[in-house]
Amino acid sequence: MNPADTSDLWWRTAVFYCLDVETFQDSDGDGHGDFAGLTRRIDDLDALGVTCIWLMPFQPTPERDDGYDISDFYSVDRRFGDLGRVVEAIRVAHDRGIRVVIDLVVNHTSDRHPWFVSARRSRTSRFRDYYVWRDRPPRKKEQLVFPGEETSMWEYDERTEQYFRHSFYRHQPDLNFANPEVRSEVARIIGFWLKLGVDGFRVDAVPFLVTREGIADEQDPHSFLREVRRFVNRREASAMLLGEVGLAHQEQLDYFGDEGTELDLQFDFLTTAKLFLALSRQQATPLAEVLASRPTVDARHGWAIFLRHHDELNLGLLDDAEKEEVFARFAPDEDQRIYGRGIIRRLAPMLESDPRRLRLAYSLLFSLPGAPMIFYGEEIGMGELSTDLGRGAVRGPMQWDAGPLGGFTTSTPSKLRRPVAGGAYAPAHVNVHDQRRDPESLWSFIATLASRYRSTPEIAWGDLHVQDPGDPRVLAHQTTYGDVTFIAVHNLSAEPVTARLEPLAEGRTVTVLLESSGSAPQGEHTEQLLDGYGFRWFRVSPDAWSAA
């Protein structure tokens, strides 16, 4: 398939940027970010090289789970504006060539959603069967999503004398997808936002849509996900579904479905976990092994690659010993860990703000086959807030300039839901304004990476091969598409290394696309000298082929 003929598969080569409207830009000085503020900042995202914005939930909410406890799927929290402001933001993004996807959080509702308020008033409520009720919880012990915060997935309702199921928090009752009315309601929610112009959805906690006891069809647990895919295709064929499926690769394959019947992209949690294991060891072997074993998917489907996002850095797919290695290196304090599996820190503090290590990590992100995703503030190396905030520690206000509140708001600190970072990560030291004007900044480097990635389609479309560079500290991987090959070498250690690459075929030209600053001049392609945390990207093409 020629990449030029795949514009309808835009998600395969998108540069995703995840943001929370509440913490991105306040336009009216009330201390809350809003859609007017987001619209004002879309040009900044365009300059960075973003091609798709992922919006975290912005619907009305009691704010007991950072917006993931939704009380109205068809509206906007009044702090952030109204539907008119949403449409305006989408239009401006589209005008800049940027797509917009939003969170689809339909595993559950808030317990203050009108459906649940009615359901718990009476067993005869028309909304009673929108949720999952039992006279007593099942005897089988279930693995908790939030150990330490919840002790059961069933909560007793005194008024109607039954238990309702909540896979997550007790204030988030699960919807019942065995009920056709609930499925129809979800279709209406999807259709509503597609009509307003969104380009797809990041589907929250997908396994819980298909595997919950008493909810999924026993004979065909993926039927609901396929219904969603068919409905999206009918309403907007170019819209995509990006799934949060925190499983091993082989288990994730089921969620792509056959021939585009379920998800289009899935977050690659296993590769991220192994990447951090590799960084902690300063050995490339864990990352090389997981890439070599990652299943190949067809042209329609793909993986979304990330370093950090809005939740904890989830290490649940590592074994206990591996998990402890990563904890010891990147979250040595117990309060930097959560749920026994995750780290609630941003990337820059984890890597001690070492420019070499940060550039190495982001070079890996953009060179691995998949669609890269950046979490807001990571492009400037923002720090986390107090770990007392739990997962909210990585969700502080965006830092746009060097002012006391980072240009996020003209309000006062007392009106902010979360404070601005302090110390070495305060806006005076870490902000977009200064970094956009500094060609050596992290922001400028990531903008360069995004540009190189977008002009090197073989990264996303090519067939992956992991080379043996003769040194376990080095990752050498390549992707080949047609007669063009992309090669990247990365030294994950602090010491200089020599990596040996496979020889080239006759009549091939090597073009260096990117390399770490201060890299020594290279001689033969087969022998690569890399400084500590050094990296280099190549394109290998026929002699007659004109390099980009």
Image (cartoon, grey):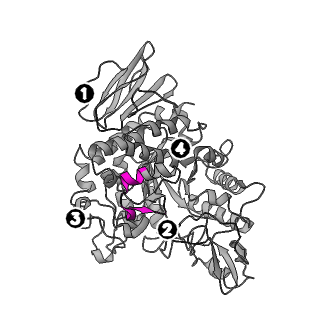
> Residue flagged by tag 2: what amino acid is it?
Leu
The residue carrying mark 2 is 83
Q: What element does badge 3 sit on?
A: loop
Residue at (33%, 44%) from the top-left corner? 447
Q: Is residue 358 left or right of residue 243?
A: left
Q: Is residue 219 above or below residue 122?
A: above
Using the numbered discs, state the Cα–Cα distance from disc 3 to disc 1 in whole angstroms.
39 Å
Q: Residue 175: image x %, image y %?
A: 65, 69
Q: In this orientation, which residue lies closer to the viewer: 30 or 309?
A: 309
- Which label's residue is closer to the chain start, 3 or 1? 3
Instruction: Tell me the crowding category of disc 1: few under 14, some 14 to 19, or many 20 or more residues within 10 angstroms, Cα based.
Output: few
Q: Residue 369: image x %, image y %?
A: 48, 38
- Which label's residue is closer to the chain start, 2 or 3? 2
Please, which residue is most extreme toward the front here? Answer: 321
Q: Residue 169: image x %, image y %?
A: 55, 71
Q: What element does badge 1 sit on?
A: loop
Q: Is residue 36 left or right of residue 195?
A: left
The residue carrying mark 4 is 303
For residue 474, say whether it is visible. yes
Q: In this orientation, which residue lies closer to the viewer: 472 or 130?
A: 472
Q: Which residues are the magenta region?
A: 325-339
- Which label's residue is closer to the chain start, 1 or 4? 4
The residue carrying mark 3 is 403
The residue carrying mark 1 is 520
Contact (CB < 8 A) between labels 1 and 4? no
Contact (CB < 8 A) between labels 1 and 2? no
Q: Residue 322: image x %, image y %?
A: 47, 48
Using the numbered discs, state the Cα–Cα distance from disc 3 to disc 4 in whole angstroms.
38 Å
Numbered label attached to residue 388: none
Q: What element does badge 4 sit on?
A: strand
